[in-house]
Image: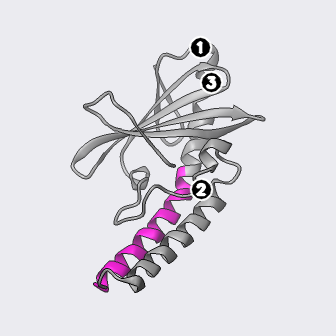
Amino acid sequence: MSTKTSEMDINIIKTPKKYEGKAEEVVRELLGLLEDILPVQERAALRYQRLEQKNLPYNKERSDRLTEIFDKCEQEYAEVIAGRCTEKEMAFKHPSCIGQIAKYAYIKGEYTVDFTMSKADTATVITHFHKENFDKKHKFVLKLVDGKWLIDAVYSGFENERKWFYIEL
């Protein structure tokens, strides 16, 4: 089954009828968070690119600058995800890496969304997208905590594989 939101289609998979109505709410919450994280990732990528353009040797100055970039990104990330992730996910407080391209840049382009919910307090959203010459996917597990959908875990994988790799938000 597929349901149409104002922005996109959501493919509802293996979800009892009683939970199908939650799809738009959960996906909207997730996409809102990704839209808020994206500028943080983009600023970090820009800072990193500027540092790379300086062609600094691998020394203390370069290391200190990378630390500054990562610390700034970590601070901005923590502000954005506060109250939007479970304690388990909040423990990371930062992206797994910073680099040339923002991890969630695909939300500005084409991607599809699958929604699955089999328990009243847990939902899974999978985004499918093309990145770096590969068809990839992210799986987000959301938990309902005190009436709010929070990110509990994030995984990444390739479309042609069944295996998922745990990643930080």
The residue labelled by disc 2 is: 93
Mark toward the start of the polypeptide (3 vs 2): 3
The residue labelled by disc 3 is: 21
At horizontal 65% and vertical 40% (from top left) the residue drawn is: 150
Q: Nearer the viewer, mark 3 or mark 2?
A: 2
Q: Which mark is residue 135?
A: none
**Alpha carbon of mark 1 to alpha carbon of mark 3: how far?**
8 Å
Three-letter amino acid code of the residue under disc 1: Lys
Does the segment drawn in magenta span residue 36? yes
At horizontal 35% and vertical 75% (from top left) the residue drawn is: 49
Q: Are marks 3 and 2 in contact (CB under 8 Å)?
A: no
Q: Which residues are magenta?
A: 34-55
Q: Is residue 31 above or below residue 94?
A: above
Q: Which mark is residue 17?
A: 1
Query: Residue 147's x, y, as percent?
Result: 76, 34
Query: Which residue is farthest left?
Result: 133
